[in-house]
Image (tube, grey):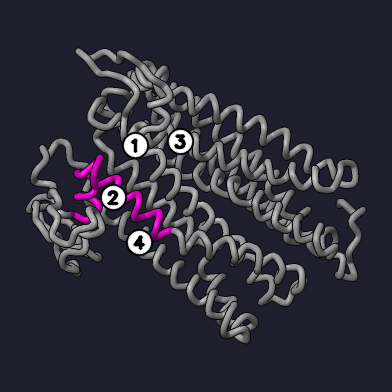
Amino acid sequence: MDDFLAARSQMAMSLGFHIIFSCVGMVMPFLMAFSHYKYLTTKDEVYKGLTKAWSKGVAILFATGAVSGTMLSFELGLLWPKFMEHAGPIFGMPFSLEGTAFFIEAIAIGFFLYGWDKFNKWFHWFCGFVVGVSGLASGILVVAANAWMNSPAGFDYINGEYLNIDPIKAMFNEAWFPQAFHMTVAAFAATGFAVAGIHALMILKKRNVNFHTNAFRISAGFAIIGALLAPISGDVAAKSVAVRQPIKLAAMEAHFETEKGASFVIGGIPDEENEQIKYAIKIPKVLSFLAWGDFDAEVKGLKDFPKDHWPPVAVVHYAFQIMIFFGSIMMLIGVIYLIATFWKKEWLTKSWYLKTFVAAIPFGYIALEAGWTVTEVGRQPWIIYGIMKTIDAVTPMPGIQYSFYFFTLIFISLSLIIIFLLLRQLKMVPKLYDPTDPNYNPKNKK
């Protein structure tokens, strides 16, 4: 493994893990706050126990996200010093603001965890809500920095120099809203389905059914909102890509020839050597409509661009197809959920209905990782789109593969620790969190 591949692999691995930690950290506090609100308005002690259980999960993921986020910030300087040298002064503002949001989140979560029966009940609830808002703000601000890499703005690039820097324009670049909107919606869908599926599994196992039913209803509600908004946010993101990065759009669809009334491709195997896609299902004119709102609009093909500017077409295309596939399944489950909630209430207790959510536990995160792959790999060979190539930003320091192995070990260890702690939380539900269980004893912390 050469140093350039090792650097890219390390960054991909780190982002792949961190995006899951951060998305859970963005969404779980809102589930926690909603459960807390239900407790305050209904006085049902089950909701209080659920809030406390989820708050411990939030604390675990917050600590893990802090570790992985700190590692990522060091990796930017370690792996990509040329990038940070030029880009740091331009897009540093969202990172500094993200640090502020992180500190607010840390303070709020401390107040919430230790504020039971010490603060005014609504101030205590507000602290939990602030955890969610600040966590969401952190995620959006980091995505704004990434969006700048896809849509560089806020400076003039003259004779190899970065002049007339405007950090406000850099932060609010053309890509930040489409990316932040789509990322936020995806985070709610992914985390909602994962949490709902875990509680559905507990219901199927007949463990603390009332407790887990309440948890399932809340998390499934958030999941469905995300799943049904995903096509809208995805459409906004795709239209933005069509304007700013037409070569990425072409790679997403393995679209080689420029044409009017371009077809939307489902499946298929890209053949970059012969510049064609094989075995694909093509829906005439749909790609033109999705990209430009006009069935007869022209969509540029990969052949319109220099071949050394092409991203890895197969990787981008397959990742896009995976994202669309799992996103569509989650949207279908959302429709089933709405039918069951409003018209077929008898479905709510059926085992097939609960098993559907159990099966969907990983779907959101698979779609999330695939979408992130489209965003990052689809920008290649650029680290700053159209300005700086990734290979020109990599560190000259040798031995990066050892750093890659070390960081991989750390992230795998973190993940195993998280799984252990969250499973332990589930096992402690009868003793610590469900007041209707005969074994309930909140004073027993063992």
- Which residue is under mark 1? 174
Q: Is residue 78 left or right of residue 29?
A: left
| Residue name at image x 81 percent, y 57 percent | 40
Which numbered disc, 3 or 1, marks the residue that appears first in the sequence?
1
Give coordinates of residue 87: x percent, y percent: 37, 21
**Range covered by the magenta-colored residues:** 230-254
Q: Nearer the viewer, mark 3 or mark 1?
A: 1
> Residue 52, relative to residue 333: is it above or below?
above
Q: Position of residue 365 (x, y in %)?
A: 48, 55
> Of the residues under marks 3 and 2, which one precedes in the sequence?
2
* Mark 3 element type: helix
Numbered circle sitting on residue 239: 2
Q: Residue at x 67, y 52 (%)?
A: 420
Specify the amino acid type for callout 4.
Ile
Quarter of the picture holding the N terminus: top left
Q: Are marks 3 and 2 in contact (CB under 8 Å)?
A: no
Position of residue 79 measured from the top left corner of the image (x, y, whole percent): 40, 25
Could one spot residue 6 in this view of the protein?
no
Would residue 386 be seen by someone viewing this image from the given angle? yes
Q: Which residue is mark 3?
A: 405
Distance of label 2 from label 1 (alpha carbons) = 12 Å
Residue type marked 2: Lys
Q: Circle 4 is placed at which residue position?
A: 324
375 in the magenta segment = no
